Amino acid sequence: MSKGRSPEPLDFFIWTIEDVGLWLEEINLGSYCQVFKDNGVNGEYLESLSMFTTEQILRFIRRCHMKWGDFITLCKELRRIKVACLRGEQEVRKPWWVPPCLSAVFVKVAKHKRRSRVVSLKVEP
């Protein structure tokens, strides 16, 4: 997805394991890159964190040997990205594979899709 540069926040739920590692470095949690990689934490997994039960969160923290403060930082950064996506504050960059003649069309469609994106919410019975 992103060769050496930070992953696109707009698409965090499709980040690869490597993208998650780059993002962890960006938010000063790079010490967890290897353990996240070993546990297969990708964007889809990060997206599902918002629906974890307390027991699942504790299991995740133990498995990744995270400090509570670092886990809270991780959650705050994920929330910041989700909110920015919903508000349309993320810059839309065209991927390398979009030909120049379609750049304007791609950006317009991406902005429209961003406004209609659904965020996961956990509903308690």
Image (cartoon, helix red, strand yellow):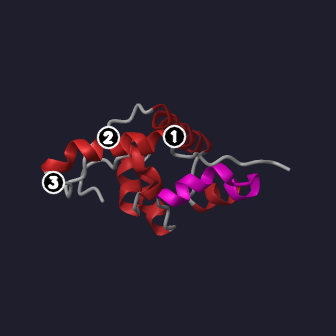
* Tag in front: 1 or 3: 3
The numbered dot on residue 108 is 2
Q: CA distance from mark 2 to mark 1?
A: 20 Å
Q: Residues within 10 Å of mark 2 (few under 14, many from 20)?
A: few
Residue at left 41%, top 31%? 89
Q: Nearer the viewer, residue 89 or 98?
A: 98
* Tag in front: 2 or 1: 2
Point out residue 35 in the picture as x, y percentages from the top left corner: 48, 62
Q: CA distance from mark 2 to mark 3?
A: 15 Å
| Residue 16, above or below 114 | below
Q: Is residue 6 visible?
A: yes
Q: Nearer the viewer, residue 70 or 10?
A: 10
Give the amino acid type for the residue marked by disc 3 in the picture: Pro
Asked if the residue at tag 3 contacts the one at tag 2, i.e. Cβ–Cβ closer than 8 Å, the answer is no
Q: CA distance from mark 1 to mark 3?
A: 28 Å
The numbered dot on residue 82 is 1
Give the amino acid type for the residue marked by disc 1 in the picture: Lys
Q: Is residue 34 left or right of residue 49?
A: left
Give the amino acid type for the residue marked by disc 2 in the picture: Lys
Q: Main secondary structure of the magenta part?
A: helix
Chain-order first, disc 2 or disc 1: 1
Asked if the residue at tag 1 contacts the one at tag 2, i.e. Cβ–Cβ closer than 8 Å, the answer is no
Q: Is residue 59 left or right of residue 123?
A: left
Q: Secondary structure at mark 2?
A: helix
Read off the magenta span: 43-57
Point out residue 36 in the picture as x, y percentages from the top left corner: 48, 60
Q: Kindly identify which residue carries mark 3.
A: 99
Q: Residues within 10 Å of mark 1 (few under 14, many from 20)?
A: many
Residue at left 35%, top 51%? 22
